[in-house]
Image (tube, helix red, strand yellow):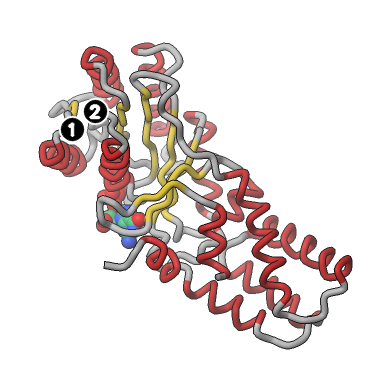
Amino acid sequence: KRSWAERLKAGLARTRQNLSGLFGRRRIDEELLEEIETTLLLADCGVEATQWLMDALRRRIKKDGLTDAEQLRDVMAELLTELLLPLQQPLQVEAHQPFIIMVTGVNGAGKTTSIGKLAKYFQSQGKTVLLGAGDTFRAAAREQLVVWGERNGVPVIAQEHGDPAAVAFDAVQAAKARGVDVAIIDTAGRLPTQLHLMEEIAKVRRVIAKAEPGAPHEVLLVLDANIGQNAITQVEAFDKAVGLTGLVLTKLDGTAKGGVIAAIARRCPKPVRFIGVGEGIDDLRPFSAREFVEALLG
Ligand code: GDP
């Protein structure tokens, strides 16, 4: 099996090859800069981040008197790192016990899979974990969590025909009673346009706060990295409804172009707590700006 770094590199291959082709040119000229700009836009960077990067790149070319295209690779790596570094804020769960995480997202983003991976991640750090099967719409999602929990010795709080807020409440109570370190509460997938469902997760959040003042301590949005600028719409809508504190960016091993993270950095900056680089249980990594830039430009 390939390492996570290789899978991230494979996922970002297209963008990396496009940029490499340009940096392989001999001279910096206006045509080259326009092609870099187009490549960034095609890589999902979005207009704002692309503009920011191009302005900074042009300033550096002028200031340092750069003439050779190959010199731009290092400058671009530096600028991208500067852009993405503020998003690198690892999730610290030690401040509260239980530390309560609420997980949101649209269907298919990788929410259920990411919850399993997160549980495994915290367990591997010696922490006890409890899951709340708050996706009461899809029986399959609940089953998936319950089966996964049984296999890994992680208790799962679920109700057959429960109301999502009631499941969340029970999960918080159980987490407190059992003294677990981390409680991860799932919510059903929903689209930002489904206003009644957006109101529903706002209610789930309020009920969690009633069960434990100050909670949830982390509200995550799970985002598929392949959805282009829709990612911005999702971050803004979920942030408005529940106050996001972090993102999990999934499927960066697939055909993701990678630039969406730059767009997030400029348009709606939120800490990227983790990235998903595969379907396996260990395929979740804390986000590192340097590792990401290395995969994109190295
Ligand atoms: P949910 O509807 O948001 O709960 O999504 P699921 O967790 O069911 O995931 C949807 C699909 O995406 C499944 O086939 C997962 O295996 C897949 N998936 C989730 N995360 C990743 C990832 O990081 N990489 C890849 N390649 N697939 C993923």
Q: CA distance from mark 2 to mark 1?
A: 6 Å
Tell me the kind of residue under disc 2: Leu
Measured along the vertical axis of the image, is residue 26 above or below residue 135?
below
For ligand 1, tell me if the residue under mark 2 lies within 8 Å.
no
Numbered tag placed on residue 154 in the rendering: 1
Answer left or right for 7 relative to 127. Answer: right
Task: Give the camera-side residue of 225 and 276.
Answer: 276
> Which of the 4 image quarters holds residue 80?
bottom right
**Quarter of the image with the N terminus in it:** bottom left
Q: Which label belongs to residue 28?
A: none
Report whether residue 223 is seen. Answer: no
Are the residues flagged by discs 2 and 1 in contact, CB closer than 8 Å? yes
Residue 118 in view here = yes
Count of numbered badges drawn on the protein: 2
Q: Position of residue 246 (x, y in %)?
A: 49, 38
Crowd tier of the residue under label 2, counting other residues whose Cα lies within 10 Å: few below 14, some 14–19, many 20 or above: many
The C terminus lies in which quarter of the figure? bottom right
Q: Is residue 185 shown left or right of residue 248?
A: left
How many neighbours does mark 1 have within 10 angstroms: few (below 14), some (14-19), or many (20 or more)? many
Measured as percent of width and height from the top left, residue 112 is found at 27, 44
Q: Which residue type does callout 1 highlight?
A: Val
Image quarter where ligand 1 lies: bottom left
Rendered residue at 29%/45% (across/down): 117
Which residue is at the front of the view, 177 or 226? 177
Quadrant of res 73: bottom right
Residue 115, x across and y down, in percent: 30, 41
Residue marked by disc 2: 130
Q: Is mark 1 within 8 Å of ligand 1?
A: no
- Residue drawn at x 26%, y 36% is 123
Mark nearer the N terminus (2 vs 1): 2
Identified at 58% across, 49% down, the residue is 264
**SS for dot 1:** loop
